Amino acid sequence: MTATTDLTVLSAEAPSLVQSVDWLAIAPVVITAAVGLVVLVADLFLAERHKPVLGWISVAGLAAATATLLPLRAGDRATFCLTGDPEACSYVADHFTLVIQFLVLAGALVTALLSVTAVRDTRMPAGEYWFLLLSSAAGAALLPASRDLATLIVALEVASLPAFALVGMRRGDRLSSEAALKFFLSSVTATAVSLMGVSFVYAATGSLHLTQVADRLEDVPGQLDTLAMAGVALTLVGFAFKTAAVPFHFWVPDTYVGAPLPIAGYLSVIGKAVGFTGLILVTVIAFPAYSDIWGPALAVLAALTMTLGNAAALRQSPDRPNSAVRLLAWSSVGQAGYLLVPIAAAAYSGRDQIGSTVAYALMYAAVNLGAFAVAALVARTKPLHRISDYRGLYAERPLAALSLGFFLLCLAGLPPGIIGLFAKVTVFRSAVDAGLGWLAVVMAINVVIALYYYLRWTALLFRTPEGAQTRTRAPWPVAAAIVVTAITAVVLSGAPELILRVTSGSLFAQ
């Protein structure tokens, strides 16, 4: 009787080791992953003529996952928390998480619309394609909610590994295979370096949860300080690679050229969002104690990235095959430099500056996916992807030309693309507020450089076409992707305060 009573008392006093799961909080990730598994299994039983239905199942799944963000809009949920420290959670659905998850899932939805036609026309294996796309989207949606280094790295790899296969999905295409191999080898190397950095951070702090790491890095023993600094530096490498920051950018042009166009657009937006999200989480949440190290480093990376990206885009010859895709690739490198500016500024003036990066990312996602959607439409009749192929597009496809012109003006930051101008001013202001005047000057110079190649391409759309024009009917999924992105860009240009409202204040759970 006494032994039984003692056990009862001990069990009553000991904390429970069973974690409760907030299924609503993780619903966007779970739905995306579950639909991917459904598509993979369904592919085994569907006849070849019925394979297109897999694409529509994927589109519906991504739409449903995006819709589940609405009940979470309060941004006050967390799950998979330590029983001994309820403040240390592995999954947090705060406002930062919800905004990035919306960007990822909505971007994947637009990619899926573009892919419906691409998979059918190029005879790519439908089951594998849709499973890989949904798996990558699930990993990308998990990453912004991750609040420990282990989950962060796992989410990063779940988002990346399927992307390698998607890039090389066009079997028998030498450029596609070469791009996939280059992307894979460089990414795996960067991930290995990051894993070493995480192990160093764990050795110095004894924890993987970002909030606990931040607290313990404030008071690292002297003999572990060098180890902690090395861990911080190495951890940032993998995320810098995903953002295509110089000097980790070399994979971008060849990968975009070799990948199917919808996947190139996906990498330019969702792939970049993955990198910037991870970079934000490890810098401003986990490593604020070492802001004097990563702040100046990211400022220099931002300056180098925007300068090299814009200079390379400026050199693209309009008549060279794949020059349109290469220009968009190098442009995305330049845009990555702008996105890095507020993260660097957060080291000097607080993490509220991160709102500027999020605002810019939302603008960039809408207009860059729109540009790739128009490129996918033009490629149906002009598969060489040359900039010169767009000459006289207005005479052939007026709505597509007007949409692409508007997207390019948004990227350039010129009216009527007010949202692009607004986003650049927001980023510029974050640099000035942080006392990074020199970086603001570098950014201003690069914006002027970028004007040339954006305006050159825009002007080409409205010139007199050369030769006979071949017009085919636009597939409605591609047309829908163009319309959705164009309407989004126009609405945001008319009311840029919508993004400011979303990104103002604190995005992170306190």
Image: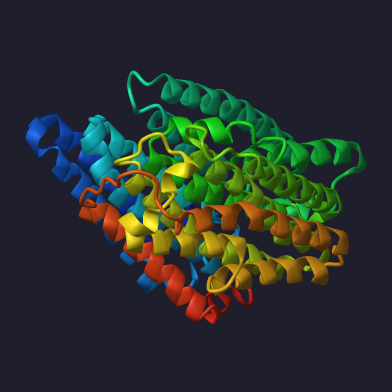
The residue at the point 81 percent across, 69 percent down is 432
Residue 221 picture location, percent across and down = 88, 44
Would residue 266 be found to the left or right of residue 39 on screen?
Answer: right
Would residue 356 be found to the left or right of residue 203 on screen?
Answer: left
Q: Residue furthest right?
A: 222
* Along the line of sight, the residue nearer the viewer: 259 or 64: 259
Residue 473 picture location, percent across and down = 20, 51
The residue at the point 59 percent across, 64 percent down is 360
Relative vertical location of residue 337 with respect to residue 204 in this rendering, above or below? below
* Along the line of sight, the residue nearer the viewer: 426 or 483: 483
* Along the line of sight, the residue nearer the viewer: 490 or 468: 468
* Along the line of sight, the residue nearer the viewer: 506 or 130: 130
Quadrant of the snapshot with the C terminus: bottom right
Give the image quarter of residue 206. top right
Residue 103 picture location, percent across and down = 46, 60
* Residue 217 seen in the figure: yes
**What's the coloring here?**
rainbow
Residue 355 picture location, percent across and down = 63, 68
Would residue 48 be found to the left or right of residue 193 on screen?
Answer: left
Give the image quarter of residue 192. top right
The residue at the point 38 percent across, 52 percent down is 374
* Residue 78 seen in the figure: no
Number of marks in the image?
0
The residue at the point 23 percent across, 36 percent down is 121
Relative vertical location of residue 435 with respect to residue 227 in this rendering, above or below? below
